[in-house]
Amino acid sequence: MISLDQIKVLATKNKIDESVIAREYVQVLFLNELYSYKFSKDIYFKGGTAIRLLYGGNRFSEDLDFTANLSFSVFESEILKVFSDLESKYPIKWKTKKVLAGKSYLLTATILGFKTPVFVKLDFSFRESVIRPQNRIMSTDYPIIIKNYINSLSVNEIIAEKIRAILTRKKMRDLYDLWVLIELGGEVDFSLIAKKLDYYKEKFNKEEFAARLKTFDKREFVQDLRPFIRIDERENLPKLFLYIIEYIESKFH
């Protein structure tokens, strides 16, 4: 396991809280373990943590999100093996969390010298297929040797999911992630957006999307993003919110 001194060094380097570094270390440990199994070829990493670890985003994240294209029964039998191996190698425990759809788990890790347990939530969705899967290399500063590709959604597919998320829920980090993905070279693919919304039997409408953007609140944006970005960038969040709203609007004219 990572040492407390290593956590302190990485926290200073990344200008972020030590608890955030400890959590991301456990996230990378789990990903490295998961993708060493054959069944993981049908598990696709996505969401905010994937943006950071695979595509160069700078926002840290709480959870690991996946789309699983295999049956519940196969998944459950295989994921138990992953958890068993994790527990045998590291001071990590797991438990199932109740959710309305999909499967959700909570990892609890103990790091020697660290004051509190480290929690990582895992969410697996089985509702829809991945349209444009990719194999990505995950590079990391953590003391972990990565031996396997990470299956993931493409940048453009994550963009489509973020646009759907903006329309169907109200998490401020979705705005930030959409901006980052486009800045990293991703494209707004309206055919992908249509496919993502079709699952909910909805259609994309530019005017409705623009109106939806105006319902997001600056204060909530600052509160939501503050724990997950560099300490030296936090004071700029109010201005960044206004910029991101205008930036996203410009992409849909």
Image (spheres, rainbow, N blue to C red):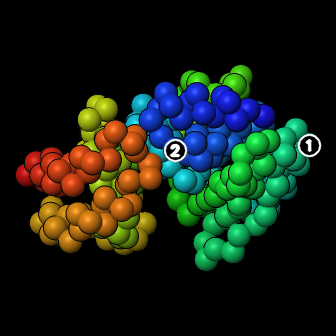
Q: CA distance from mark 1 to mark 2?
A: 28 Å
Looking at the picture, which amino acid does disc 1 mark? Answer: Ser
Q: Is residue 27 above or below residue 101?
A: above
Picture residue at 71% right of the left edge, 70% below the top: 97
Name, please, the residue furthest toward the right: 88
Question: Could you say which is closer to the camera, residue 76 or residue 120?
Answer: 120
Q: Which mark is residue 88?
A: 1
Image-quadrant location for residue 186: top left
Give percent across and percent down for residue 150: 61, 33
The secondary element bearing badge 1 is classed as helix
Comes first in the chain, label 1 or label 2: 2
The residue at the point 73 percent across, 32 percent down is 3
Q: Which mark is residue 17?
A: 2
At mark 2, the secondary structure is loop
Mark 2 packing: few (<14 Cα in 10 Å), some, or many (20+)?
some
Identified by mark 2, the residue type is Asp
Q: Are marks 1 and 2 in contact (CB under 8 Å)?
A: no
Residue nearer the viewer, 28 or 108: 108
* Side of 200 relative to 180 (left or right): right
Query: Residue 88 appears at what percent x and percent y?
Result: 91, 43
Q: Is residue 37 visible?
A: yes
**Would residue 231 be found to the left or right of residue 137 on screen?**
left
The x, y position of residue 184, in whole percent, is 31, 32
